[in-house]
Image (cartoon, rainbow, N blue to C red):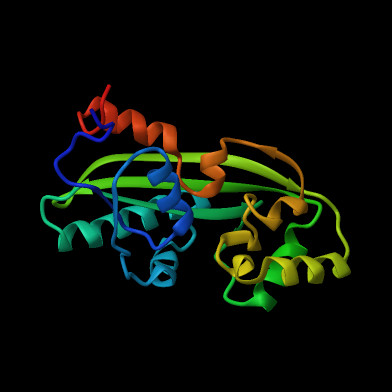
Amino acid sequence: MPLWIAPQPLVLASKSEARRQILAASGLPVEVRPAGIDERAIEAQAGALAADQAARLLAQAKAAAVAKAMPGRLVLAADQTLSLGTRRFSKPADRAAAREQLRALCGQSHNLHSAIAVMRDGELLFEHLDLATLTMRNFSERFIESYLDTAGAAATASVGGYQIEGAGIHLFQRIAGDYFTILGLPLLPLLDFLRRNGFIAS
């Protein structure tokens, strides 16, 4: 008997390969359907909201957009924001922006806020918000350039300019929090919801 017992695959409202791989590795069939929303516009709407609430708003907006286009389907969306004190960070647009984020985060502890939302037919069935705290070590300008050369496109694929499952791990002195939360998909709370509601075997 398979783990996934719902009649149709879970729809992932994200183009994140890391999130798709997390779900697939856990035995869940996934249909990828990126939301195609203007994330920066939604962040602008979030205004002075704290970073955790901005992540929550983004996840809900992504789930709602895809659920509207796919009636009857179970849609999962996720988003992640980074905060350093009161400053909120978005995904760097290019290498220069990644460099500036790394300079700001160097030697500091920052928070990653990961939010998920599950919707079907416009109804929010489940949401969860989790926090991880990461401390970057002190590093030189020369190291930043070496890191950016090594990381390549990964430096602009995630907020903060890093992915801890890759070369980004070299940036850190200390990490406190759930691994999946850091990757942008709090997995255990999601699996618990799916199990309790009969989508996966219990």
**Residue nearest the observer in this picture, 156 or 121:** 156
Q: Residue at x 44, y 59 (%)?
A: 16
Q: Residue at x 20, y 29 (%)?
A: 198
The C terminus - image quarter:
top left
**Residue nearest the observer in this picture, 45 or 1:** 1
Q: Please, which residue is most extreme toward the top here?
A: 202
Camera sees residue 5: yes
| 16 versus 97 height, above or below | above
Q: Residue at x 56, y 35 (%)?
A: 178
Q: Quadrant of residue 168?
A: bottom right
Camera sees residue 86: no
Q: Position of residue 94 (x, y in %)?
A: 61, 77
Q: Residue at x 69, y 78 (%)?
A: 96
**Residue nearest the observer in this picture, 54 or 72:** 72
Q: Quadrant of residue 160?
A: bottom right
**Residue nearest the observer in this picture, 75 or 84:** 75
